[in-house]
Image (cartoon, helix red, strand yellow):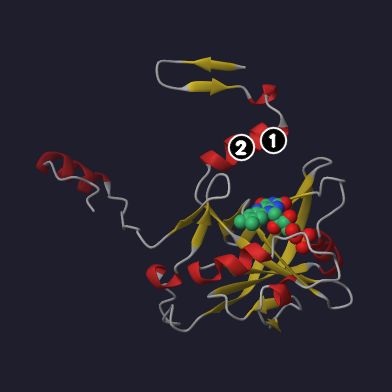
Amino acid sequence: MTSKSDTHYGIDFSQLTPHECYKVLIGSIVPRPIAWITTIDNSGRVNAAPFSFFNALSADPPLVGFGIQRKADGVEKDTLRNIQETGVFTINIVNNSLVEAMSICAIAFPEQDSELVAAGLSSENGILVPSPRILDAPVSLECNKTMIIPTGPKGEIVLGEVVFAHIHQDLCDPEKLHIDQQLLDAVGRMGGQGYSLTREYFDLSVKSVDEWAASQDSGERIWSK
Ligand SMILES: Cc1cc2nc3c(=O)[nH]c(=O)nc-3n(C[C@H](O)[C@H](O)[C@H](O)COP(=O)(O)O)c2cc1C
């Protein structure tokens, strides 16, 4: 059911097909961070695939989560199967120079083919988990699976705890741990086949009540770029 106010369409999700729900979600919740996830199976074979139904969910404990859909025939994707088998995964952050390689890793290659080889990338075993990290990634986060939550017959949500981070030395002072956002140059996922760059960003601190009141009196704009 679609209704209309003066300014907005009202869309009742119970009347939409799953694909229509997907279109509204991915077009509205943007930009989404991309978890480029590397895993291994029980025999040590490496798998890599991107997931943008993803975010950091908690800092204490440091939890991340991502949603993984089943394939059209209901079979699990390799990433989920590997996490079920090994209990670990590694999230690699995608920057602008890696975005095409990341996209190659979303191709539905046969199980025995390595996405990383196809994308021309190298990996190295993790420090605290056996799943590997992508060497060219600016940041890689080693994770232990916390839980896998079934969301119905079509998919699962995976929660994991970050136990180790690899951060390129150009990006951060190891004492301060501020990651240079400009140099990180992370890419986000938009609606459709779209992506966004993060180079144009701005700082906006949350003011105290007093600072806010003073800015109202002086007519100062809270946000100015
Ligand atoms: C940028 C991007 C984001 C994606 N996000 C998701 C996602 O959140 N969930 C999902 O199930 N598939 C997502 N996909 C599709 C998977 O990457 C794709 O199905 C992949 O082949 C799965 O690989 P696997 O079978 O090796 O795990 C995404 C693809 C791209 C290119």
- The amino acid marked with disc number 2 is Lys
Q: Circle 2 sits on which residue?
A: 23
Q: Secondary structure at mark 1?
A: helix
Point out the quarter of the image occupied by ligand 1. Answer: bottom right
- Left or right relative to 109: residue 163: left
Q: Quadrant of the N terminus?
A: top right
The label number, if any, that marks residue 72 in the structure image:
none
Disc 1, disc 2: CB below 8 Å? yes
Residue nearest the viewer, comparing 57 with 224: 224
Residue nearest the viewer, comparing 60 with 42: 42
- Visible in this render: residue 209? yes
- Left or right relative to 114: residue 123: left
Q: Circle 1 sits on which residue?
A: 19
Percent of width and height locating residue 70: 80, 49
Q: Secondary structure at mark 2?
A: helix
Percent of width and height locating residue 129: 73, 77
Residue at (86%, 66%) from the top-left corner? Answer: 85
